Amino acid sequence: MSNRPSALLSATFWEPGYEHLVESVHQRDPEAARHLASLDVAIHDEQGKELASLPQDRASEIVDLDRIVRDVAGTEHRVMVLFDARYDERIFPYRPHHYAYLHRRGSTAPALYYAVNAVLGGVPDRIGAARLNNFETYVFRASPFAERYSVLLGNVARFSPAEPEVTLYYERDRETRTVTLGPKTHVELDLPAEREGQRLRRLEVKSVFRLATYVVGRRAASGDLVLFDHLFTYFK
Amino acid sequence: MANAVRALARSLLGVIRVPTYYLPWIARPGLECTLVLSNVEARFKPDSRRGPYTLAVEQYDADGAVVRRHELTLRDATDVVELPLVPAAGGYGLVTVSGERLYSDLYVTVSDGESYCVTHGRGEWIERYPAPARLAHAAVGGVLALAGRTVPAFTRHQYAYAGTDSRSHLLVLNLSNVTNRVRVTATREGTDAPTRVLAIPPLGARLLDVGALVGAGGETRVWRLHLAANAWFNFYLVGTGPRDLAGPVSLMHVK
């Protein structure tokens, strides 16, 4: 193990009622070399308050997020969860990544599998955090679906607030919203699928540094998550 | 070391890697699969701001046969074209997209009509083996397959999830012009599931039913999959709910 471990800070969001299993290392490497140097999980409410900081067994392959968060979260309907992974670059020459499995208990919706947002750390020129300007986009289907869309934004910075600019592109018009996010705070912004008869076609998020960002789709009737996806980064 | 050995082997065999952007597709009764094509990142490339951009799309079925070819044009960098894919033999396969000055990742969506899920493709390559190398693969691979083995030229590791209410399957794509024998082993906490060898035709695909491999009753269990293959391959995860593959599915890339 190197005495100068690399760091990877990743972020996701927990909601109650879901099986939510996070891979501490997305497997690419031989089994014997897969262990992290350490993995700490921090849980923050919407206002940024740290509810808990929980070191994980570094040899554990799967973090059962619901098991470790649900008691800590109490009555919160959503919390931001940060994964602080320390690793040896010789073992993970790219980065260890975290992927996750997500399914609402009792739902008829399919299970989702997603890449946990890598927000800070890792190999700088490969992680999308090397430059100050961060610019992400997402394209939506044109057809109407019985689905509600939103974007989850989280600021994982320790001290600095962020003012991301969120632009919704409809067929002809656009709408821009600016959000203020204090350190460790997060917000879910609704994305109306239709505005004045025009369908939502594209989303852009601009910020001065990388945020935790997920595009979310929920079944209109039940609210079950059917889309939980990263955006695409232009400038990195 | 392994990379160096593989590079040397490719050189000796005369393998050519053709840069290719590919996506998976899956279409079942009640599910439609649509590509969402754009080149929105071209706005930030000084030499490519204007368009139009011409794209060529080839859809392959599970056995690697081309079932449909499309040529389409994106008017400019903000144009988005949705291309419904046709259900074809096997109900799944891969799609390639080519075009000059194409900078953006492309999406594939799967919908049951009420909602849709989406994932993106990969800009990688397809391995082209010359005739002698194809014959060698067929001979050696055929013999090894009799013993449930393959030439482990490429390996991948992946977790799979299996329970009563939901599970993940693997849509394995053969990204080469030889028959790719992919040997899959699944383990968890000292338990080994039966080994499976998928023989995938050139540019074909196979859906590995993880529930059938490891059992899917009770609470969700996590399995470690190890995949070894004689030629280049990749896979996507197909997520299902309580109706398994008879219900809506999700589709997701891996690293």
Image: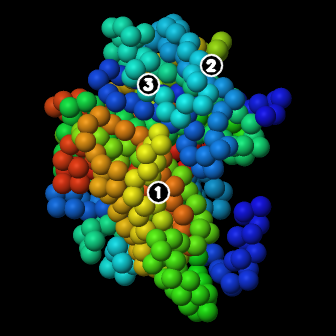
Q: Residues within 10 Å of mark 2 (few under 14, many from 20)?
A: some
Up the image or down, A38 lies above or below A103; here it is above
User: Where is the N terminus of chain A found, in terms of image quarters?
Assistant: top right
Up the image or down, A129 lies above or below A138; here it is above
The residue under label 3 is A65
In front of the other: A69 or A123: A69
Q: Are marks 3 and 1 in contact (CB under 8 Å)?
A: no
Task: Give me the residue at 23% from left, 54% from top.
Answer: B245
Task: Give me the residue at 66% from left, 26% from top.
Answer: A38
Up the image or down, B70 lies above or below B225; here it is below
The residue under label 2 is A157
Q: Position of residue B83 (x, y in %)?
A: 32, 64
Q: Position of residue B18 (x, y in %)?
A: 60, 76
Q: Residues within 10 Å of mark 1 (few under 14, many from 20)?
A: many
Q: Amino acid at mark 2?
A: Ala
Both marks 3 and 1 on one chain? no
Q: Amino acid at mark 1?
A: Thr
Both marks 1 and 2 on one chain? no
The residue under label 1 is B185
- Whether residue B111 sits left or right of residue B251 in the image: it is left
Label 3 to label 1: alpha-carbon separation: 27 Å
